[in-house]
């Protein structure tokens, strides 16, 4: 049995959980009741897709500088690791501000993923005509292979590279993105919604202790957010725990239903007069043929080859998609495996104990055995303790 399979991030959440307990204990006369949860239909025969994505990680965090290449001014907006969707509106706000400051009457966006779509939308809202140039568009972009949770510090930079300046920029991106996402709540198709996520343990997790050995240590910043952006997790007592016999923590998370959400962004962009042109670039020299002189480069992992940027490191992540279960409205994390209840298919991912899992791995071949093991682990969360 693994008593604490989630590493130091989960240990850090323990202090937040205790805050939640303290707050609840002061509510005189309020009695909690264990909710009845719909069981996850987790079995190998319900797997409909296995995908692998290489997250575009940079040790120093996202690249947001301005570069002059020939007659073109390039505003970079890439390298967000596992936080591309989470930070997209905030990061693109910074990039668009720099691009608009150039005084261009028309701007090009290179890339049609999370950062490209939000950059293009914000340019339109600023009154600037914009064309997206991209080889692929959703659902065939890497962004479409994301988990779909608001995780603003997921592989955002290496521990020790989170300087005070970076932290300030990161929090700005967080707050802008978080605020913008609230405007998508309640829309048809639920492009964005809040869910409860349950962390299960076979034995009491330690509130502190030595960290598991890790090949790579990423900066953990989310714990520093104010409570309005990071609701404290709550450790559930026996009278409120829907998983009897296991230690359980519950936290609220924001989830993106990426199929509907990406469709909504593209529809808004096109409805407001935007254009998407299918085009492949092999080097920055190819940009010289574009009519626009100001470009926002939102090519994500593609920037590694396009710009020869070897600071972009792949971090492999595999997702297993199960048949959608409309009656499921909560997430689950158990024995190093997570479940996200997206409407376009339940997403199961093996997180592992080593937070450096997948670092530097650019392989994209699906691993069926890994997928089935992850699904079986989620299924075992609903078995009686001691019988798994």
Image (cartoon, grey):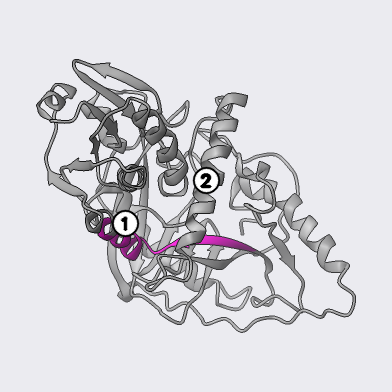
1 w.r.t. 71: above or below: below
- Please tell me in which quadrant of the rendered image residue 171 appears: top right
Tag 1, which secondary structure?
helix
In the image, residue 264 lies in the stretch drawn in magenta: yes
User: Most extreme residue toward the left, as rendered?
Assistant: 289
Residue positioned 30% across, 54% down in the render: 144
Q: Which mark is residue 176?
A: 2
Q: Residue 55, percent across and down?
A: 36, 41
Q: For residue 184, say whether it is visible.
A: yes
* Front-most of residues 126 and 230: 126
> Quarter holding the N terminus?
bottom right
Note whether 76 is above or below 259 in the view shown.
above
Stretch in magenta = 251-267
Q: Residue at x 25, y 49 (%)?
A: 141
Given residues 252 and 271, the one toward you in this image is 271
Q: Earlier in the sequence, mark 2 or mark 1?
A: 2
Q: Is residue 376 left or right of residue 38?
A: left
Q: Which mark is residue 265?
A: 1
Residue 334 seen in this snapshot: no
**Residue 168: x %, y % from top left:** 59, 31
Q: Is residue 233 magenta?
A: no
């Amino acid at each position: 049995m693994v008593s604490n399979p989630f590493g130091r991030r989960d240990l850090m959440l323990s202090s937040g959980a205790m805050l939640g307990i303290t707050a609840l204990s002061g509510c005189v006369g309020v009695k909690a009741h264990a909710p009845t949860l719909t069981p996850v239909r987790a079995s190998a025969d319900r797997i409909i897709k296995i995908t692998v994505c290489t997250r575009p990680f940079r040790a120093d965090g996202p690249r947001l500088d301005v570069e002059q290449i020939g007659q073109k001014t390039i505003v970079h907006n890439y390298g967000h690791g596992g936080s591309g969707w989470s930070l997209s509106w905030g990061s693109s706000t910074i990039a668009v501000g720099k691009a608009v400051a150039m005084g261009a009457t028309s701007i090009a966006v290179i890339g049609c993923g999370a950062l490209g779509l939000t950059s293009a939308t914000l340019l339109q809202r600023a009154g600037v005509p914009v064309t997206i140039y991209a080889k692929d568009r959703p659902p065939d972009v890497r962004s479409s292979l994301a988990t779909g949770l608001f995780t603003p510090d997921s592989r955002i930079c290496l521990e020790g590279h989170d300087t005070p300046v970076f932290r300030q920029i990161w929090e700005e991106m967080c707050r802008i993105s978080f605020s913008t996402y609230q405007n998508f709540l309640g829309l048809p198709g639920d492009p964005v919604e809040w869910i409860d996520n349950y962390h299960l343990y076979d034995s009491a997790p330690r509130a502190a202790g030595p960290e598991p050995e890790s090949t790579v240590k990423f900066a953990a910043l989310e714990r520093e957010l104010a409570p309005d952006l990071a609701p404290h997790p709550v450790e559930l007592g026996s009278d409120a725990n829907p998983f009897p016999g296991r230690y359980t923590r519950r936290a609220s998370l924001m989830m993106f239903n990426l199929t509907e959400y990406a469709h909504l962004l593209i529809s808004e962009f096109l409805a407001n007069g935007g254009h998407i042109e299918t085009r492949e670039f092999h080097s920055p020299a190819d940009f010289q043929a574009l009519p626009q002189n100001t470009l926002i480069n939102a090519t994500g992992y593609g920037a590694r080859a396009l710009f020869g940027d070897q600071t972009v490191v792949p971090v492999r992540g595999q997702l297993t998609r199960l048949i959608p279960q409309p009656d499921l409205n909560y997430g689950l994390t158990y024995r190093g495996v997570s479940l996200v209840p997206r409407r376009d298919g339940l997403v199961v991912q093996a997180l592992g104990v080593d937070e450096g899992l997948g670092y530097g791995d650019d392989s994209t071949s699906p691993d069926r055995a890994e997928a089935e093991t992850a699904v079986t682990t989620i299924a075992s969360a609903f078995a009686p303790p001691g019988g798994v």
